[in-house]
Image (spheres, helix red, strand yellow):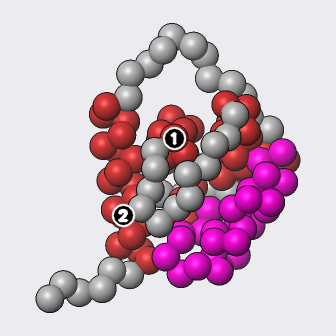
Amino acid sequence: MSKPQTPSVRALIFAAGIIAGLAALQTSGKTQEFGDPVQGAILTQKICSTCHGVARGEASPNPAAPNFNHIGSIKGMSATALNVALLTPHHQMPNLILTSQERADVIAFILGLQVR
């Protein structure tokens, strides 16, 4: 019988999935769009906050969903890693369809939460 996973273990598994996705990522030569963290905050509040804590230090309503402050502060987290994560389906996460600009905005917001 396996031990239940804690949210921090889930976050590590999530990060490992991002890293694996990066290994398979092929660049298209297209430059990445710059995101607007203000628009990202509005978008995440609208579509992500039912599961994730989106504001700095806010607890997630769904304990299985890490808060964005935690995700943004994972060592080595980058815009590329978050882009891969947003494009990769996850078992417990709905299949979000965001435009490239919306993804860039969400990424800019999440990375702006990093503890410096």
Q: Mainly helix, strand or loop, the magenta region?
A: loop
Vertical placement of residue 97 versus 1, above or below: above
x, y (%) of residue 6? 38, 81
**Residue 87's mark?**
1
Nearer to us of marks 2 and 1 is 1
* Occupied quadrant, residue 71: bottom right
In the rendered image, residue 110 lying in the magenta stretch gets the answer no
Measured in 3D between alpha carbons, the distance from the residue under mark 2 to the one under mark 1, in whole angstroms, is 18 Å
x, y (%) of residue 7? 44, 77
Mark 1 closeness class: few <14, some 14–19, many ≥20 residues within 10 Å: some
Label 1 sits on what residue type? Leu
Vertical placement of residue 110 versus 24, above or below: below
In the rendered image, residue 59 lying in the magenta stretch gets the answer yes
Q: Residue at x 68, y 57 (%)?
A: 113
x, y (%) of residue 29? 51, 11
Can see residue 115?
Answer: no
Locate the C terminus and report the quarter of the image it occupies: bottom right
Can see residue 30?
Answer: yes
Please tell me whether mark 2 sits on a helix, a strand or a loop: helix
- The magenta-colored residue range is 39-68
Mark 2 closeness class: few <14, some 14–19, many ≥20 residues within 10 Å: few
Direction from residue 102 to residue 79 in the image, left or right: left
Vertical placement of residue 73 versus 10, above or below: above
Q: Residue at x 40, y 47 (%)?
A: 18
**Residue 12's mark?**
2
| Mark 2 or 1, nearer chain start | 2
Q: Residue at x 58, y 79 (%)?
A: 62
State if disc 1 and disc 2 touch (CB < 8 Å): no
Q: Residue at x 14, y 88 (%)?
A: 1
Please tell me whether mark 1 sits on a helix, a strand or a loop: helix
